[in-house]
Amino acid sequence: MERRTYKNNRFITFHYQKMNSVFVLLLTFISVVSGGGHETPQQVVTRYNNYKTICTGLGYEHVSCKAGNEGIVFQSSLSKTLQNLKNKETVIYDKVWLNEGKAYNEHTGKFTATVKGIYAFSWTTLSTSGKYFISEIVHNGNVMAYSYCDGRGIGGHPSSSNQVYINMRKGDKVWIRTHGSNGLYAHGGHWCSFSGYKI
């Protein structure tokens, strides 16, 4: 027996047989839970397996056991000052403070997604008076955003930051590079940083 309801230009079918199956599973669960007190180890294992079967039948998923749910996060910075970088040269943040998931490579300056998902990235640049450092974040070579740090005509140390969110597939890469040949001066001593994490 089934009942059809018209909603959002589509027929939604309610199967009473499925509802009856859920009801039977619930009754089975109640009978299993109300078992005896003194059990052998084998009976405990059997009871556990019964619980597991019932929960699976109700649609429960133990998502923490699925691959890809481990934390992916990194924090890196420049230990040495960078000057006069070439056109679209990768900025290599050589000091890694945190690298859960091992997705960031401090030798290439590139982050490689180990699993599909949405990732957040941010980077901060500090330059110096009379100099500038214009950078961009790229996803597989495609520019996603810019950061404009310009100290010309001012005193002190100008800084700039930016943040992006990127939908990535496994194996996709993200990195920071100079915008054109505008990488004149990026302060070392960990004043410049690049970080990211999987949301």
Image: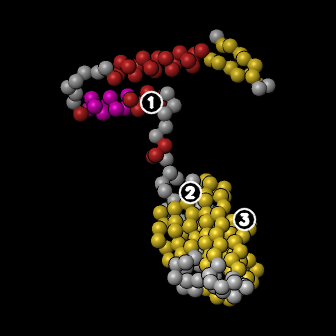
Q: Residues within 10 Å of mark 3 (few under 14, many from 20)?
A: some
Q: Which residue is tagged 1? A: 55
Q: Amino acid at mark 3?
A: Met
Q: Is residue 53 part of the magenta span, yes or no?
A: no
Label ID, residue 152: none
Quadrant of the image occupied by residue 51: top left
Q: Please tell me which of labels 2 and 1 falls first in the chain.
A: 1
Q: Is residue 44 part of the magenta span, yes or no?
A: yes
Q: CA distance from mark 1 to mark 3?
A: 44 Å
The residue at the point 66 percent across, 55 percent down is 167
Secondary structure, mark 3, is: strand
Secondary structure, mark 2, is: strand
Locate residue 80 relative to residue 6 in the image: left or right: left
The residue closer to the viewer here, 174 or 151, is: 151
Contact between labelled residues 2 and 3, with CB atoms less than 8 Å apart:
no
Label ID, residue 198: 2
Q: Which residue is tagged 3? A: 144
The residue lying furthest to the left in this view is 38
Q: Residues within 10 Å of mark 1 (few under 14, many from 20)?
A: some
Q: For the stretch drawn in magenta, what is the main secondary structure?
A: helix
Percent across and percent down for residue 71 are 49, 56
Observer able to see residue 110: no
Magenta residues, start to end: 42-50
The residue at the point 47 percent across, 17 percent down is 24
